[in-house]
Image (tube, grey):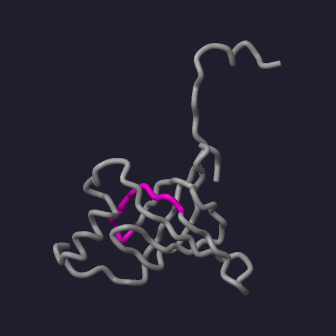
Amino acid sequence: MLPDAMEGPEVIGMLARSVPTRLLDISRTGCLLESRHRVDAGTVGELRLQLHTETFVDDVRVTRCVLVEGTGSVYLVGAEFVQTHRPGEQSIRRAITGILRGLAGGPPPREPHKRTAVNSVDSRGENA
């Protein structure tokens, strides 16, 4: 039987976890990530992209996750940007659009140091 504390208005919560990833490819609509963790298709989360000293953030939905044969536990994760709100100053979508339009100020970013992490919650609101 449920304790008395569970009676009353329904409270909805969300479980989240951080999944370390590496950015392989990116466009205005989505990206390809590499991870040592499987992430189910349909998982919705927040993608944080760290370039040098700046961090960019956007919401993504995983469209596919494929095990790379012969690697043991390396997955390719395809994700699309989800437009849950207008892109803010630190939006990945805004940064990519600026770069693609040639509007990004300063020297071009050095290629090798890209760190990403997906804080994910599956479509049912459960830990992915």
- Residue 8, above or below 98: above
Q: Give me the residue at 48% from left, 67% from top.
A: 116
Q: Residue at x 47, y 74 (%)?
A: 23
Query: Where's residue 96, x and y in %?
Result: 29, 70
Looking at the image, which is closer to me, 89 or 93? 93
Q: Is residue 69 left or right of residue 20?
A: right
Image position, residue 69 (x, y; %): 70, 84
Can you say whether 34 is above or below 121 in the image? below
Q: Which residues are magenta?
A: 50-62
Q: Is residue 56 magenta?
A: yes
Task: Residue 37: give x, y in percent of width and height.
Answer: 66, 67
The image quadrant of residue 5 is top right
* Residue at 50 percent of width and 54 percent of height: 45
Quadrant assignment, res 20: bottom right
Q: List x then y, in percent, for residue 101.
A: 19, 75
> Which image quadrant: the N terminus?
top right
Q: Main secondary structure of the magenta part?
A: strand
Asked if residue 105 is among those painted magenta in the image, a careful observer would answer: no
Q: Between residue 31 and residue 36, name the one nearer to us.
A: 31
Q: Residue furthest bottom?
A: 70
Above or below, 2 against 115 in this view is: above
